[in-house]
Image (cartoon, grey):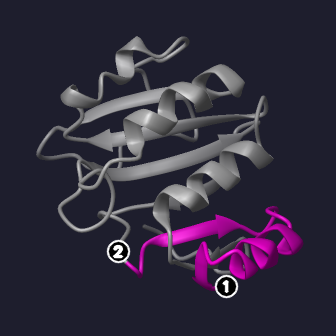
């Protein structure tokens, strides 16, 4: 991952799912999310609008081994479908099924968590309002900004 410190903030997550739900709500109707990993049992292909084609800037982060890759539009319907799918233990974090996840709006990457949410691989775009991140910090979703 390239270090683009002037356009991204490195963050530490406390609650992976809670953070994603908050980001999805904040960008509902405006964003696409990508998921890469060992995903067959998640049945992401059943979510309306899901595609296994990369869409810039949401691209594969791993060349080998080849992992499953899905892009899902973020809207009320897909959030409702994603919550029960992604809310189980073993989905995110060390050894989780989702190895990389990203969120983008209008061709701009606004969030990425790579390498099973490794603490050195989680970032948000500087375009994500600091007030939103501060609220997430108060809610216990973030450990630090």
Residue at 41%, 81% in the rendered image: 120
Q: What residue do we see at 42% from left, 67% from top?
A: 1
What is the number of callouts on the image?
A: 2
The image shows residue 13 at horizontal and vertical percentages of 52, 75
Between 87 and 61, the one nearer to me in the picture: 87
In the depicted view, which residue is nearer to us: 17 or 4? 17
Q: In the rendered image, which quarter is residue 22 located in? A: bottom right
Q: Can the viewer see residue 59 in this picture?
A: no
In the rendered image, which residue does mark 2 sit on? 118
The stretch drawn in magenta includes residue 4: no
Residue at 60% x, 46% y is 103
Considering only vertical position in the picture, is 24 above or below 130? above
Q: CA distance from mark 1 to mark 2?
A: 15 Å
Within-10-Å neighbours for mark 1: few <14, some 14–19, many 20+: some
Horizontally, residue 1 falls left or right of residue 128, namely: left
**Residue 42 lies in what quarter of the image?**
top left
Point out the tag, 1 or 2, that comes first from the N-terminus. Answer: 2
Which disc, if any, is residue 125?
A: none
How far from the left and from the top, in percent, is residue 5? 64, 80
Residue 142 located within the stretch drawn in magenta: yes
Q: Is residue 95 visible?
A: yes
Q: Is residue 63 above or below residue 71?
A: below
Q: Look at mark 1 in the image and give the residue it sits on.
A: 145
Q: Which residues are magenta?
A: 119-145
The secondary structure type at the circle numbered 1 is loop
Name of the residue lying farthest toward the bottom = 144
Q: Determine crowd level at label 2: few under 14, some 14-19, many 20+ residues with C-alpha closer than 10 A.
A: some
> Does residue 90 appear to the left or right of 50 in the view shown?
left
What is the quadrant of the C terminus in the image? bottom right
**Residue nearer the viewer, 132 or 115:** 132
Element class at badge 2: loop
């Amino acid at each position: 991952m390239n270090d683009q410190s002037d356009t991204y903030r490195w963050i530490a997550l406390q609650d992976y799912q809670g953070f994603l739900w908050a980001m999805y709500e904040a960008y509902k109707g405006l964003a696409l999310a990508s998921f890469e990993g060992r995903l067959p049992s998640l049945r992401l292909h059943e979510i309306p609008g899901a595609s296994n084609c990369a869409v810039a800037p949401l691209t594969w982060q791993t060349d080998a081994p080849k992992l499953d890759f899905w892009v899902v539009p973020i809207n009320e319907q897909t959030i409702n479908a994603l919550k029960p799918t992604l809310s189980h233990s073993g989905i995110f974090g060390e050894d989780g099924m989702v190895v990389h996840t990203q969120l983008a709006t209008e061709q701009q990457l606004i969030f990425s968590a790579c390498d099973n949410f490794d603490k050195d691989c989680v970032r948000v775009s500087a375009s994500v309002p600091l007030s939103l991140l501060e609220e997430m910090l108060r809610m216990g979703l973030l450990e630090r900004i």
